[in-house]
Amino acid sequence: MLNTVRARRGMVTSPHHLASEAGLRVLREGGNAVEATLAMAAALAVVYPHMTAIGGDGFWLIGAPGETPVGIDACSRAAAAATPELYARSGLSAIPQRGPLAANTTAGTVAGWGEALALSAGRGGRLPLSRLLEDAAWHARNGFAVTASQSQLTAEKRPELADVPGFADTFLADGAAPATGATMKLPALADTLERLGREGTESFYRGPLARDIAHDLAAAGSPVTQDDLAGCRATRVAPLQVDLPGVRLFNFPPPTQGLASLMILALFSRLGVREAEGFAHLHGLVEATKQAFLVRDRVVGDPDAMSEDPRTFLDPAVLDRLAARIDPARALPWPVPPSAGDTVWLGAIDGEGLAASFIQSIYFEFGSGVVLPQTGIVWQNRGSSFALAGTGPRVLAPGRKPFHTLNPAMASFADGRHMVYGTMGGEGQPQTQAALFSRYAFFGQELQAAITAPRWLLGRTWGAETVSLKLEDRFPPELVAALRAAGHDVEMVPAFDAMMGHAGAIVRRPDGTLEGAGDPRSDGAAMGF
C-alpha cells in the first residue's frame, strides 16, 4: 500500500479486504458510516477469527465534523461467580490465559452493535440488521480463504489451545493448523449470525440465543451464567479529549487506555520537535509513551473502582509538568509490566460526514480458545487480565470491568478536516496511533505514507514476548545507533512485521473529499466510491 485512496461518497478501512468490501457495499446501498462499520465488524469476526469474534468486547466513537463524538462502551463485566475464591479452590494463584476459567466475563460487542444501531437510526440509518450481517453469514457458511496470519498464529498457539473445548473441532484441520489459502467454513457461526439478524441483538443476552450461549458456557466450565448475560448492556459515554495546536483529539475513557493515547501526543507536542523520522521524533514519542504508561498503569481500570479522574492528566499544567520530565537526549530506564492483546480497528466516513471509529477484541489470539458448539462463538479471555490479589481497579470482583488496551480515536482539525484512526496491537496501540498521527498531522506526510512508514514498539504487543524497543529494520542504521547510544534497549524486527499493528485511517476534507489508508502489515484495504 503506497498511495492514499480518495473518494467522495464514502470510505471504509479495515484489516481484511472482505470486511472492507462488506462495508463499502453497505455505503453503496445508502447505509451510513455506523451501518457500514457494523457490517465490517461482523465480517471480521468470520474471516479474521484469530483476531476478533462476537464473543468479545467493543468500543465506538461516532460523530461528524464540528461535534463532540458519542462513545459507546460495550465492555464486558466479570461474572457473579468470578471471584478470587473460585480460582483459589482450583489451586490457582493467577487467572489462566486460556480455557473456561479464562472465559470469566460476559461479551459486550453485540450489545454495542445494538446501541450503535439505535444511535444510527437518528442519523439516517435505515438498513435492517439482517442485511448488515449478510456478508459475514455468507462467508461463514460458504467459506473463506485462511490468511497467512491465521495459519501462522494457529500453528504457534496450537499447543496451548488444542485441548480447549471446541477449539480443535472448529479451527484445526486433522489436528493441524489450516494452510494459507485453505477454505474454512464456520456453519454454526453462520446460523448464529442469521439468528441475530432475525431475533435482534437482544437475543444474545436476554433471548433464545442467550439460553444456548449460557448452556454451552456452563458445559465448558465457564463461570458466566444466563443471569450474567442478562445484565450485560452497552452504554453511551463522553469521550476524553485534549486540545493541541490546530486540532482537538478524542479517545475513549476507562476502562480503556485511551488516556495514554491522548497523553502521548499531547506530551510530544510540547517537545518542540520540528522534523519527522529523526532521533528527536522517535525518541520524543518513545519517552512520551513511558510517561503516559506510568500514569495509565497506576490509574486506569474499572472506572467505578478508580480513585483518580483521568481528565486530570489532560490538564495543560499537568501535561507541561510531565513533558518537563522527558530528557531530550537520554532514555528513561524501562520496562514496566507488559500486556498483550488481539484486536481489530476499523472505521468509516459516509458522504454526509458521519464518522465511526470502532475497535473490537477477544484479547489474545482466539481469546480463551473456548468455542461454543451450538453457536460457533469464540469467547474472549479479557478477564484473564484481572489480578487475584492486592488493591486497585484491576483486581477481580464480580461485575467489574477489565482493563482494555482498546481505544478508538478521532480528531477534528481547526481547518475543517475530520479524522478517524486506530490500530490493533495491545501496548502498541497508543504508539502506532502516535506514529501515524504525528506523521500526518504534525509533519504533513500523506495519510498512506504515514501508515506504511517504518514503525517502532516499546514493550510487548501482539505476537511479541520481549519488552524492548523494537524497530522495523527499514530505519537508517545511524538512527538506530543514536537510539542505542541514548540508552534505548533496541531490538530489530523484520520490515512490515504484524507485531507493529494493523493501522488504518480516514480523513474527510472540508470540501467533502475523503482520504483513506490501510496497513500493508494486514490483509486489509481502504476502499471508497
Image (cartoon, helix red, strand yellow):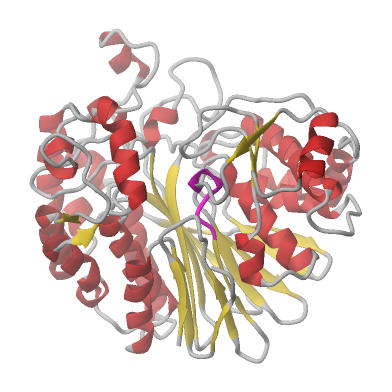
Asked if the magenta segment contains residue 500, the reply would be yes
Q: Residue at x 84, y 39 (%)?
A: 322
Q: Which residue is depicted at the point 81% across and 58% down?
A: 276
Image quadrant of residue 223?
Answer: top left
Residue 321: image location, x then y, percent: 88, 40
Whole-percent x, y for residue 27 in the image: 38, 84
Question: Quick check: is 138 in the magenta stretch?
Answer: no
**Could you tell me residue 432's position as x and y percent?**
62, 51
Q: Is residue 467 left or right of residue 39?
A: right
* Residue 426 left/right relative to 124: right
Q: Look at the image and tell me in which quarter the C terminus lies.
A: bottom left
Q: Nearer the viewer, residue 220 or 481?
A: 481
Tell which of 405 and 321 is nearer to you.
405
Q: Is residue 381 left or right of residue 175?
A: right
Classify residue 424 as left or right of residue 115. Answer: right
* Residue 486, image quadrant: top right
The magenta segment is 498-503
